[in-house]
Amino acid sequence: MTQSASAVAANAIQYTITPIDLHAHLYQVVLNIPQPKAMQSLSLPVWIPGSYLVREFSKSLQGLGASQSGQLVDIQQQNKNTWVVDCSAGEPLTLSYQICAHDSSVRTAWLDSQRGFFNGTSVFLRVHGSEALLQVLHVEPPAQQPHWQLATGLTAAQTNPQGFGRYHASSYDELVDCPVEMGPFWSAEFMAHGVPHRFVVAGAPPSFDGARLIADTQKICETEIRLWHTRGKPPFERYVFMLNAMDDNYGGLEHKNSTALICSRRDLPRKGDAKASSGYITLLGLISHEYFHTWNVKRLRPMELASYDYEKENYTELLWFFEGFTSYYDDLVLRRAGLLDNSQYLKLLNKTINQVLQTPGRHVQSLAESSFDAWVKYYRQDENTPNATVSYYTKGSLVALCLDLSLRREGHAGLDQVMRALYRRCKAGPMREQDLLDVLDELTDRSWAADIRAWVHGKLDLPVAALLQAHGVDCQPDTPQIAQQLGLRVAEGATGIAIKVVLRGGTAEAAGMMAGDEWLGIEPLQANTDSIGWRIHKLDDLPLYAGDAQQVLALVARDKRLLRLPLQLPPRAAATPAKGRKKAPKAASKTDTVTLAVADVNRVNLWLDGR
């Protein structure tokens, strides 16, 4: 080690984390600062990059204490997540504290007798002024579980065969961007374009088919690497997938050379099953999505997130690009990797289109506004969310679809070329919306400003149907389900129908229904007949008991009161056209539901193959 390197190591910020009480879910963290400032400031982040919500991680921190030269020193709390230590400059300072880890999501920290997991943003205090120094992490195994293993994307410096020991990070940003998984997990490795990848799975049942998961994930990784790099290797030396299989959960969070995932155990591939279940396809889409983020948001990233401010919200209007375009590619990559056929892919695309069409908020909020408001709206959804907002994931993916198909219709190479050009232009770094416009202009010799302004900053429906039709897919209006016809989102159970959302402009809203009501039954209103009430437990029973009545009294319970609300029923569905007969395209907004049908297989394949 050179003298300068030795000096850097001597100044390194050192963390030691130990699972000290599995049943109390407690990690012990010891932080050593070799050369602190006088009155050293420290703070714990309030959010984690990739999940745009202030989560107040400091609520789980307890027992903070500090010492210098063997003597206790005072700590003054400045605000909810910042502390100042009354210490001398230049003398080693040691802090210790505990983290209660009882959040099983991918965003924070977890610890029990079966598994340990943490993100650095929720456990490691940031030493103000020392963020660019080498950060050294010692991870100790739990004394009660000597057989546990460890997996992380951090660079190992000195570790035992199970993976516990010392790791290095070049900065605080890198330290907290590498989550750590611990436990008796299943593990396997594979190569993708010459780069080692590791996949660990916690909580897998005996039926789990690990060989299939590895083979399919390898196809995904190789397909995405080829998409971003026509030649050469990806911009990381290794990659780690960390999947926690639970009874019923779902989610993922991207990192620079790893990802943390959650799925239902039922969605894992099973030995002996030749056909992929819908749950497993969803899991593969999640894997594809988070791996795609390795390029699109972790390297090519919004200008506003060029450097993270861990103390507050980091606003950007570009989540429609970074999340939406990633959502477009996640399933498309599965199709290109041979994990979906055309029919399966179009079924997933069909679902996305209908999700957007069935959201009245698409006419209230633009995609740019949706991105900016993620901190207060997307992650804090309530009964009014569908009426007032639009998802930058779903509608953003349709903007990517429209851009891809528009480029192809005009004789250009498509969206892949745009993504690669953006990656090169921004040198895998900060991006502005203007960069996208400039790249499109360079590649096509025309301005796309009006298109992006209408699709991203406007609130009108996207030209999805016309563009799909130009590429061999008919977008046919379809009859929506009863809930959508009434303008409701519900949960059906043995006791009745729980109303979760009342959509703007629907007949349910006109009747006076509201979120939180329990719909118990109906009384048909029909001339020359006696009114008879009927108990209903699911919306599909409505036509059965309403008969020919065009209006019913809906019996609902609200705050222990029984209300009788006059509800206008939707007209009976028109007959479905005979098989093979094409219907003339209509405005999707008339039904809020469409069905995709292949009209020209060759044109569809050209698009889906990326040719």
Image (tube, helix red, strand yellow):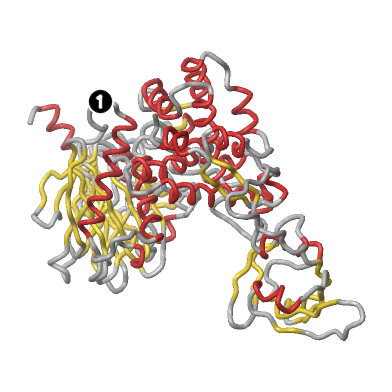
The image quadrant that residue 490 belongs to is bottom right
Quarter of the image with the C terminus in it: top left
Q: Position of residue 161 (x, y in %)?
A: 8, 55
Q: Residue lying furthest right in this view?
A: 528
Visible residue check, residue 42 = no
- Residue at 50%, 47% in the rendered image: 349
In the rendered image, the vertical position of residue 337 relative to residue 263, given as above or below: above
Residue 532 picture quarter: bottom right
- Residue drawn 38% across and 55% down? 281
Percent position of residue 425, x then y? 40, 20
Q: Nearer the viewer, residue 577 or 98?
A: 577
Left or right: residue 113 versus residue 355 is left
The amino acid sitting under disc 1 is Arg
Residue at the (85%, 76%) spot, across then down: 525
Is 41 left or right of 140, judged from the image as shown?
A: right
* Left or right: 166 in relation to 504: left
Q: Examine the rendered structure and indicate whether residue 427 appears above or below residue 360.
A: above
Residue with the mark numbered 1: 231
Secondary element at tag 1 = loop
**Residue 587: x %, y % from top left:** 70, 43
Seen in the picture, residue 467 relative to 242 is either above or below; the reply is: above
Please indicate, yes or no, whether residue 351 appears anywhere in the rendered image: yes
Q: Is residue 340 above or below residue 142?
A: above
Tell me the quadrant of the picture where the N terminus can be found. Answer: top left
Nearest the eye: 64 or 544: 544
Of residues 447 and 589, the one drawn nearer to the viewer in this rendering: 589
